[in-house]
Amino acid sequence: MKHLTSNDLIQKVGIILDESYFHEKDDLIRDLVKQGIKKENIRILVFKNHIKKNESFDYPVYSYKDFKWSGSFDSETLRTFLSQYYDLLINYYEMDKAVLHLTTQLSKCGFKVGFASVDKKVNDLIIHTSAENHSEFTSEMFKYLKILNKI
């Protein structure tokens, strides 16, 4: 199935973030709000390689354990995130992990943005920077979103 890019303006934003390499979730969200995205229109889903038994989180979190060998999942966290439509899906991960690609593929979105280090077929817009440079990432992303008349 071919992904068709939407011409809609960006209002609702979803973020799939790999916490293995980036922990400044609040700073990333703050960068998006500075660019005019309403905080209440931003949803984040955080991937962790391993979740400790009694660990608590400020954001919805999932891990490898939430997926079955067939690729299906039984997680309310995933179901809630994936049931929403996002005008923009930010794939904030630099490493190619099948579980992250699957989550991206299952997401309902109009436009996907991510890093150059990830498989080029995953995203509609590719930003050449690293996850540590969240300010540069959002600045570049919004520069191109303006050019594309998305904001």
Image: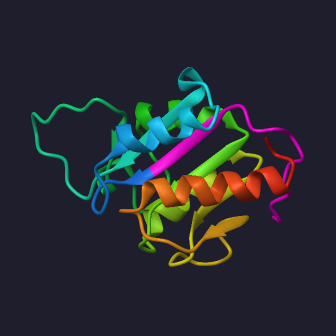
Q: What stretch of residues is rendered in magenta?
A: 1-16
Q: Within the image, what quadrant is residue 127 found in? A: bottom right
Q: Residue at x 13, y 36 (%)?
A: 55
Residue furthest top as drawn: 40
Q: How is the image coloured?
A: rainbow
46 w.r.t. 95: above or below: above
32 horizontally vs 135: left or right: right
Which quadrant holds the C terminus? top right
Q: Within the image, what quadrant is residue 57 found in? A: top left
Nearest the eye: 95 or 138: 138
Q: Residue at x 72, y 31 (%)?
A: 11
Q: Is residue 101 magenta?
A: no
8 w.r.t. 1: above or below: above
| Type of secondary structure dominating the magenta stretch | loop
Q: Is residue 15 magenta?
A: yes
Q: Residue at x 9, y 33 (%)?
A: 54
Which quadrant holds the N terminus? bottom right
Q: Residue at x 41, y 73 (%)?
A: 95
Visible in this render: residue 95? yes
Residue 21 image offset from top left, x and y in percent: 30, 63
